[in-house]
Image (cartoon, rainbow, N blue to C red):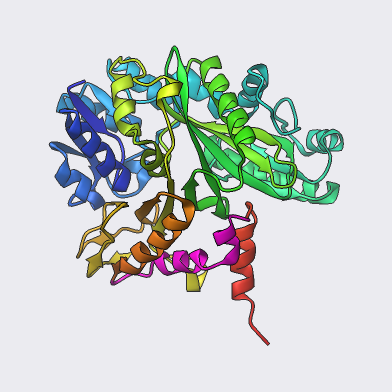
Amino acid sequence: MKRLLVANRGEIAVRIIRAARDLGISTVAVHSTADAEARHVRLADAAVEIGPPPAGKSYLVVDAIIEAARSAGADAVHPGYGFLSERAGFAAAVADAGLAFVGPDAAVIDQMGDKVRARQVAAAAGVPTVPGTPGGVDDVAAAVAAAADVGYPVMLKAAAGGGGRGIRVVEDEAGLRTAFPAASREASSAFGDGRMYLERFVRRARHVEVQVLGDGTDAVHLFERECSLQRRRQKVVEEALAPGIDAGVRDAMTAAAVRLAREVGYRSAGTVEFLVDDETHAFFFIEMNTRIQVEHPTTELVTGIDLVTEQLRIAGGERLPHGQDGIAARGWAIEFRVNAEDPARGFMPSPGKVGRVELPAGPWVRVDTWLEPDVTVPPFYDSLLAKVVVWGEDRETAIRRSRRALAEFAVEGVPTTAGLHTEILDQPWFAAGEFHTGTLEQWLSDREEPTA
């Protein structure tokens, strides 16, 4: 691999460009007209404009990205996360163009991107799955019949995709008959496939994911991350490791993730996601993300392994450099996603011109960002400004250091969620590590209720 095209923008494009430069690989940025002066464009060795601001006319146009790679002389493409990163058709188009795709094969993306098929593969690998339908359901009548077997409450999920699209929790048949058509329409709009599947809803669940690396022949895990603090099914704070997960559960869950990765011949970095019942500690497979994750820096800080570098090496044909015995976790890391959103106005996105920017620094503080003074936050893309990632020798130290880091974060011109993260740190349930996937939304709802 000599020249890498980065098919993304923002902080992840900056992150990939830096990893490539560490390996002596030259880089090509792509950009919409709105991103012509963006940081990732200036950091890359070359840049190609691919279209107007809307992602559907630029970052999501496969032909434009393939042509950019050809014209710039790239021999590989890294998709980052979001956009085209989990589109099997994009991975296939990259391969058909004679370029290396930095990620798993198109067939694996297709297999694991279909929730129903992924559950079937997981079950075949001996990985526990949430009780649910064995296949997708196309209409309300089939959903009602299936729910009678699965048992209420049930969760409706899009069979063909993730990211929270199409998900509904229903308590009874009447709720299911109301929710199914809307969820199916949303799934069809997002993924071109309106099929849904049902699984039993675990009311008090933790969302814990296991980071894996595979080279197509073997696979290893890099321990787990805690991702339960979510708003509208979007992660807000992540940790590595997961508080409250004992050694027995950790060993069983990470072993299950490795079995699944080996079952599909996984190549590259990926994440196997689980629900953990907060009361029984039983864990269940929910999906596999076939890409680098937003929260990957937490794993890097506790293991000392650069996941993006490993992706590039594997895509270049190298084998895994570490056996499982050579991977250890040390200390604790926490990541805070700072978005250009206004928590006081229902988390309304807040694009606009940025003035002064001050980013945290000092020992064991990492900030992944595209942000600079005097830039404009565009209204067309995800509102993520920066990821503040902090390491400590234990969780208590990481929390104390997080307070210091967030106090140093300052952006003038647009509202951000940095202050909200400081509030979260001060909550007793966060300090104790006693939370689940519903905790954050309940706390946010309680904060908004007027006092008498």
Residue 381: tell me if it is visible: no
Left or right, 373 with reference to 432: left
Residue 402: x %, y % from top left: 40, 60
Q: Residue at x 38, y 25 (%)?
A: 103
Look at the picture and state if 67 lies above or below 373. above
Q: Is residue 167 magenta?
A: no
The N terminus sits in image quarter: top left
Name the residue at 55% across, 61% down.
431
Left or right of 155 on screen, residue 162: left
| Quadrant of the drawing holding the C terminus | bottom right
Residue 423 in magenta stretch: yes
> Where in the figure is residue 238, as x and y percent of width and height?
48, 49
The one nearer the camera, 327 or 445, is: 327
Left or right, 315 with reference to 255: left
Q: Which residue extends farthest bottom?
A: 452
Give percent across and percent down for residue 85. Answer: 40, 33
Q: Return the residue nearer the eye: 110 or 61.
A: 110
Q: Which residues are magenta?
A: 412-434
Residue sticking out furthest to the front: 393
Q: Nearer the viewer, residue 331 or 261?
A: 331
Residue at x-position 28% and y-position 54%? 363
The residue under the point 26% across, 52% down is 370
From this view, report whether residue 88 is shown above or below residue 430: above
Eyeballing the image, is 140 above or below 322?
Answer: below
